[in-house]
Amino acid sequence: MTSGFFIAFEGGEGAGKSTQTELLSKRLTGEGFSVVVTREPGGTLTAEKIRSVLLDPTITDMPDQAEALLFAAARADHAANLIRPALENGSIVICDRYLESSVAYQGYGRNLGGTYIRELSEWATQGLLPDITVYLDVPAQVSLDRRKGTDRMEIQSLDFHMQTQQAFRDLAKNSQVAHIIIDATLPIDEIAQLISDAVIAELKSR
Ligand code: T5A
């Protein structure tokens, strides 16, 4: 059993997840909550080391299966060593990407199978799911225009990113986890207000 509250942010490249996780953290901290901001892949020593392999653009021959297992391995460590302990301490955990990124990118983008990839992550995290997911919906072309770098995932084709975007949209509509769906082409401040209003309402209703 956990006593904190787990918020995941999902969406394509450059959707504004890092921007919005920081803004939500400031707002919730201002309201007096204890907040932990983290990201995937990453968040712990082991998971950050795995991240550097996963995003290394000089690695051009990684099999899709190895990629999927590395994302799941990073998530297993992150869930066990950071997210679950923070929730048990009563904190709000805000995570920039989580399980749905694997379903969208590895399950659909890489065609490894959404159900299989979900089950792999659920096994890796011993069933740790967010209380709520904020999905920032942004067209794939806008994503690519906003991108900052050229990491191993970002350099995939527009088709790949369109497939992941459709998968994210389907997940947001059909998931059993509550989703706040936001048009990520709106101005940054407007998005921040929509998210904090929805999250605070959810926290008050608990
Ligand atoms: N991945 C990840 C998988 O394949 N499987 C998995 O299981 C997981 C967890 C992670 C990569 O790994 C993949 C997905 C990714 O390809 P990353 O660096 O963490 O790599 O990638 P992103 O999460 O995409 O990080 P980005 O920093 O690229 O995107 P963000 O965080 O969504 O966007 P942000 O906030 O940095 O903003 C990007 C730019 O857009 C502007 C910002 O100012 C910034 O310049 N911006 C806006 N501009 C206009 N209007 C708005 N509303 C804007 N919001 C932000």
Image (tube, rainbow, N blue to C red):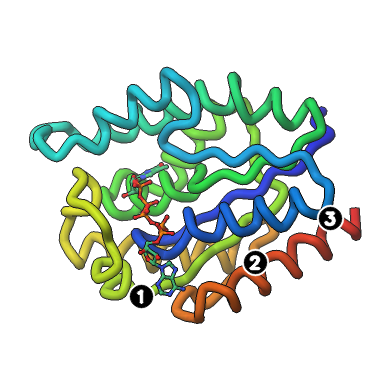
Q: Is residue 51 above or below residue 31?
A: above
Mark 1 = which residue? Answer: 139
Give the residue type that dot 3 points to. Leu
Do residues under tags 1 and 2 come within 8 Å of each other at their CB atoms? no
Residue extending farthest right = 205
Q: Secondary structure at mark 2?
A: strand
Tell me which residue sits at (9%, 35%) in the image.
Answer: 58
Q: Secondary structure at mark 3?
A: helix
Describe residue 138's horizontal placement relative to residue 54 as left or right: right
> In the image, residue 26 lies at what x, y percent?
67, 53
Tell me which residue sits at (49%, 24%) in the image.
Answer: 44
> In the image, residue 183 lies at what x, y percent?
52, 77
Give me the C-alpha separation between circle 3 and circle 1. Answer: 30 Å
Mark 2 = which residue? Answer: 180
> In the image, residue 165 lies at what x, y percent?
37, 66
Residue extending farthest front = 30
Give me the C-alpha separation between circle 1 and circle 2. Answer: 17 Å
Front-most of residues 102 and 37: 37
> In which of the image's four quarters is ligand 1 placed?
bottom left
Q: 10 Å neighbourhood of mark 1: few (<14), some, or many (≥20)?
A: some
Give the residue type that dot 1 points to. Pro
First-in-chain label (3 vs 2): 2
